[in-house]
């Protein structure tokens, strides 16, 4: 596929611009208007937006206690600022993917950044916890539009470099996740909890200005979807996700019982709504998400790998500070440093693999990275050996998980996209959704097990070991990922 594309570009120079963009005319129009596409500035603009979103995903957690006292509410309602964000983010991911393909990537990107910035400003000014929770849902819905539209912009305008540019996305998110808690701690200590929201405002304004200046305008495409937005599908997915998250949230409560009505009732609603949703996709003339993008040949294995090796791994890392404190008594600062070790490894390997993917193909780095993740999780579950301190042992294990995660990031992003570049926005949304679902399920099961345990550190160690077994069982999925070398 990559070879054929390059051959076409060489044999017919006038075709190269159109092939390189993946968008029949976007770069060509810019060239005719003497406005060359400046890929470096486009990527910088997108990277700033993605960084802002990734920082926001971790910065608020550090301010929960201060936010609770500042608004005079309970810790449970303060925690809903995180739950509402997760719900809004997951629900709106496929919506924004659909809108990006229907209305244009640039329009959705600009609208998402502008709405996110305004919602952040309003969050920082909120004086009521219920208003803040609603605003967080709006903020999340806007943030959900970043990755799908940004991926579409890259696919449309980066030509032969789009595989590497998309692969480099994996180095942006770990950086944001690392610096988020640091900024949050500084704001809470030296300013106010409102700073965790207000910090987005100047960054968002800069991104809007850069996007207006450097991201090429959207142009009509013959293949662009013009179908309806499938309100029925959106409603079923929203009900299913909300009910599932309510069930998961209950499991995290002290004294929660898996066989009690507060868990069983929302779980049954979630299962009914989601099963109806999938049946609806197969019957609708304009489905919310094309079914073949979820479970079709090639797409199904890629989505499952994103859930298992992407989402579950995220959940493992999210739980690491709690594990370090419960089992080894490591301080909050020390626990945060463990996440930095994992993040540095993920950034480094994502960058390296993004530039070597054309030679290796998808399956070798997926296999190597997955095995490293499994080894790292096993080490987390194991007590330190050979006189190594508990901090050094956990840091090494976290680093190994980060190396594995960084190694699988570029092939996971590219494997689905190269099958259907015209659906880049929707596929990027599905990947993000898969990661979120895998992480939520992992954290929910772990917190349910820990809630009734007298030895949470030991229980979490066994949970990590069970997780490693699940990851090991999933290795055969890699053989079903469509292989590809070169550009796409």
Image: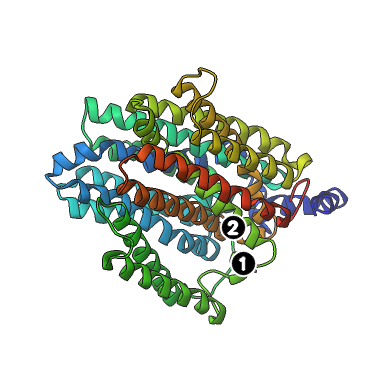
Picture quarter containing residue 204?
A: top left
Residue 436 placement, left or right of 263: right
> Between disc 1 and disc 2, whose residue precedes?
1
Instruction: Determine the secondary structure under disc 2.
Output: helix
For this view, does 458 lie left or right of residue 41?
left
- Find numbered disc 1 in the image and state the secondary structure of the residue it sits on: helix
Along the viewing direction, whichever of 475 and 432 lies nearer the viewer: 475
Other-residue count near label 2 (Cα within 10 Å), few / some / many at <14 / 14–19 / ≥20: many
Direction left: furthest residue: 72
Residue that protrudes farthest toward the right in the picture: 11
| In this rendering, position of residue 155 left or right of residue 458 | right
Q: CA distance from mark 1 to mark 2?
A: 8 Å
Q: Residue at x 70, y 47 (%)?
A: 159
For this rendering, which residue is in front, 386 or 171? 386
Above or below: residue 135 compared with residue 99? above
What's the mark number on residue 303? 2
Nearer to me, 471 or 171:
471
Name the residue located 46 percent from the left edge and 43 percent from the top edge.
Answer: 462
Q: Are marks 1 and 2 in contact (CB under 8 Å)?
A: yes
Residue tagged by mark 1? Answer: 295
Residue 217: x and y in percent read 55, 53
Mark number displayed over residue 149:
none
Q: Work out whether 35 lies above or below 400.
A: below
Q: Position of residue 439 (x, y in %)?
A: 46, 50
Which residue corresponds to the image point at 52% horizontal and 37% vertical from the top-left? 172
């Amino acid at each position: 596929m990559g070879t054929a594309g390059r051959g076409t570009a060489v044999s017919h120079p006038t075709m190269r611009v159109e092939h390189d963009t993946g968008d029949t005319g976007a770069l060509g129009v810019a060239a005719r208007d003497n406005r060359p596409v400046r890929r470096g500035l486009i990527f910088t603009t997108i990277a700033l937006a993605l960084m802002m979103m990734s920082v926001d995903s971790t910065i608020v957690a550090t301010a929960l206690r201060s936010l609770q006292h500042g608004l005079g509410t309970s810790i449970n309602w303060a925690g809903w600022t995180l739950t509402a964000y997760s719900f809004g983010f997951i629900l709106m991911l496929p919506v924004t993917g659909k809108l990006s393909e229907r209305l244009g990537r640039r329009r959705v990107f600009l609208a998402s950044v502008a709405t996110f910035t305004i919602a952040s400003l309003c969050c920082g000014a909120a004086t009521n916890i219920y208003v803040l929770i609603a605003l967080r849902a709006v903020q999340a819905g806007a943030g959900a539009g970043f990755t799908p539209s940004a991926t579409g912009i890259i696919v449309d305008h980066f030509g032969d470099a789009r595989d590497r540019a998309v692969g480099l996305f994996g180095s942006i998110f770990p950086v944001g996740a690392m610096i988020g808690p640091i900024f949050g701690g500084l704001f809470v200590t030296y300013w106010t909890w409102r700073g965790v929201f207000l910090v987005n405002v100047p960054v968002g304004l800069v991104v809007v200005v850069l996007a207006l200046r450097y991201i090429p305008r959207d142009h009509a495409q013959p293949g662009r979807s013009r179908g309806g937005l499938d309100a029925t599908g959106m409603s079923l997915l929203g009900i299913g996700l909300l009910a599932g998250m309510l069930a998961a949230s209950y499991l995290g409560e002290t004294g929660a019982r898996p066989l009690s009505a507060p868990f069983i009732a929302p779980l049954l609603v979630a299962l009914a709504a989601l099963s109806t949703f999938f049946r609806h996709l197969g019957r609708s003339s304009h489905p919310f998400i094309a079914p073949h993008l979820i479970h079709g040949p090639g797409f199904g294995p890629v989505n499952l790998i994103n859930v298992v090796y992407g989402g579950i791994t995220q959940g493992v890392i999210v739980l690491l500070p709690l594990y370090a404190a419960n089992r080894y008594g490591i301080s909050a600062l020390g626990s945060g440093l463990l996440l930095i070790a994992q993040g540095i490894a993920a950034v480094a390997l994502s960058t390296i693999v993004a530039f070597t993917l054309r030679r290796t193909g998808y399956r070798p780095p997926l296999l190597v990275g997955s095995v490293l993740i499994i080894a790292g999780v096993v080490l987390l579950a194991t007590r330190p050996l050979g006189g190594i301190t508990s901090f050094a042992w956990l840091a090494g294990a976290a680093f190994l998980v980060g190396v594995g995660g960084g190694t699988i990031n570029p092939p996971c992003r590219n494997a689905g996209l190269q099958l259907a570049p015209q659906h880049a926005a929707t596929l990027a949304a599905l990947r993000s959704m898969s990661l979120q679902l895998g992480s939520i399920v992992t954290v929910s099961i772990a917190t349910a097990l820990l809630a009734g345990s007298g030895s949470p550190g030991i229980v979490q160690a066994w949970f990590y070991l069970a997780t490693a077994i699940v990851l090991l069982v999933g290795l055969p999925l890699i053989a079903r990922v469509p292989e590809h070398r070169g550009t796409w």
